[in-house]
Image (spheres, rainbow, N blue to C red):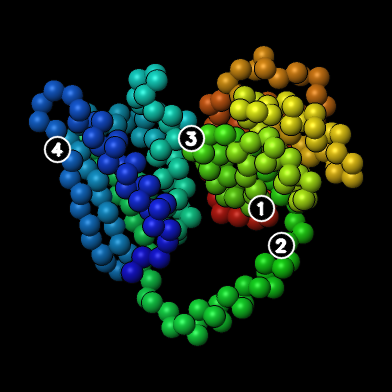
Amino acid sequence: MVLGSREELQQIVMNLLLNAEQAVSGPGEGAVTIRTASYGGLSTLEVADNGGGVDEELRGRIFEPFFTTKPVGEGTGLGLSISHGIASAHGGTLELVPAERGAVFRLTLPVHEAAPANDTATAVAALEPELASRADLPYALVVDDEPAIRKLIVRLLKKRGFEVLEAASGDEALKLLRDRNVALVLCDIRMPGMTGVELYGSVSTLTGVPVPRFVFMTGDRGAVDQSFDGAHVLAKPFTAHELDKALAAFQLRGQPASDSP
């Protein structure tokens, strides 16, 4: 049995199937094959297509955020990166494996034995002291009205050891900033309602709330007034390495976590 979020695992499979469908959408007889297997405490699912495949020089970048081989306007370059993050969060892997033709993506997840109810209760009780000790840790807050981008950046920050909150709007973010100890905000500029710049201005006027470090994320650098003290700009699309540089500029790091990205 594989333990995990049904919705998130379905998202991986749908992303792989959509990519495979697009890879075989040209002239000729396209084929998409799904294979499953279980061995050595692992469960695997492979999605294979007989399309054009992935060029050798691009294989190492295929899971990077915002990277895409599709034409401009088709796809965000987030599907595989998000899927890779979901697989890692479930203790598994997602990889592009060698194939004679086309592309083959393999999802591997650990198989778990069903635990008795009393064992589950014991495990939850053991976690309570750790959860209490983390309650007062400073948070990072990700503010973006695009769910796919927001979820991706949340995952990147969690991989770097941050406790992360997320908000889909400036108003929602402002409420979290009043109620939580937030040290870092990664915020989109252009959002419906309150913009990122307006959120920054509102936070600076809150009584008793320290102004957190701000990282603006935007495809338009001209949208940011560079006179804001303590603000950094990440131009979309950005890489995990560029995110690390922004965090290093603020000398911010999370708790020890697994290797990034």
What element does badge 2 sit on? Answer: helix
Tag 3 or tag 4, which sits nearer the N-term?
Answer: 4
**Residue positioned most to the left:** 29
Disc 2 to disc 1: CB gap under 8 Å: yes
Camera-nearest label, 1 or 3: 1
Label 2 and label 1: CA atoms lie apart by 8 Å
Q: Amino acid at mark 4?
A: Ala
Looking at the picture, how far across and down is residue 20, in whole percent? 25, 37
Tag 2 or tag 4, which sits nearer the N-term?
Answer: 4
Residue 251, picture quadrant: top right
From this view, report whether residue 64 is shown above or below residue 195: below
What element does badge 3 sit on? Answer: loop
Give the residue at mark 3: 65
Give the residue at mark 2: 134
**Residue positioned most to the top:** 222
Looking at the picture, how far across and down is residue 107, in whole percent? 33, 52
Give the residue at mark 4: 31
What element does badge 4 sit on? Answer: loop
Give the residue at mark 1: 163
Q: Amino acid at mark 1?
A: Glu
- For the point 60% across and 55% down, the residue is 257
Label 4 crowd (10 A; few <14 / some 14-19 / many >=20): some
> Where residue 196 is drawn, which disc sits there?
none
Disc 3 to disc 2: CB gap under 8 Å: no
- For the point 47% across and 47% down, the residue is 85
Tag 4 or tag 1, which sits nearer the N-term?
Answer: 4
Choose between 191 and 236: the one closer to the eye. Answer: 191
